[in-house]
Image (tube, rainbow, N blue to C red):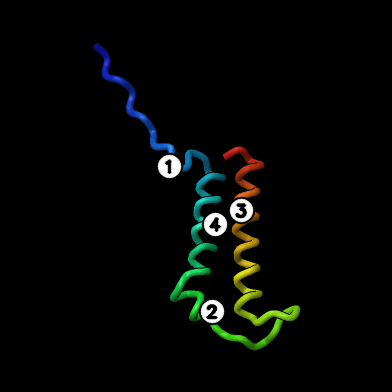
Amino acid sequence: MKAPAPFKSHLLPRTRAGRIAVVAFLALLALTQPPLVYLLANRIQPWILGVPFLYAYLLIVYLAMIAVLIWTLRKGL
């Protein structure tokens, strides 16, 4: 009898684009978590479009994370 083929994990990306998407998403996510957010954006001044810098920074990073998710959806990853 033949041994069954080992299953590949569905959690690991199989393509180069998948690996890029995972690394980009995790890097952006790291920018929103302490201690990085405290070191990079923990300030109120300057105000950007009527909101404190911290909120503008977080908005930009979260929008970039959403862009990565939309890109992976369109690529079919």
60 relative to 77, above or below: below
* Labels 3 and 1: the sequence-earlier one: 1
Instruction: Name the mark nearer the viewer: 4 or 1.
Output: 1
SS for callout 3: helix
Q: Are marks 3 and 4 in contact (CB under 8 Å)?
A: yes
* Residue labelled with disc 2: 40
Q: Residue at x 59, y 58 (%)?
A: 65
Circles 2 and 4, Cβ within 8 Å, touching? The answer is no
Q: Which residue is mark 3?
A: 68
Residue name at image x 47 percent, y 70 percent = 33
Q: Residue 68, position in %: x, y?
A: 61, 53
| Residue reaching furthest to the left | 1
Where's residue 12, x and y in %? 43, 42
**Element at badge 4?**
helix
**For the point 24% across and 11% down, which residue is it?**
1
Tell me the residue that label 1 is attached to: 11
Lower position in the chain sequence, tag 4 or tag 1: 1
Side of 77 relative to 8 (left or right) = right
Dot placed on the residue nearer the N-terminal end, 2 or 1: 1
Task: Provide residue 2's location: percent of width, then percent of height.
Answer: 27, 14
Residue picked out by circle 4: 24
Q: Tag 4 or tag 2, which sits nearer the N-term? A: 4
Q: Local crowd at mark 3 within 10 Å, few (<14), some, or many (≥20)? A: some
Cα separation between marks 2 and 3: 21 Å
User: What kind of residue is marked 3?
Assistant: Val
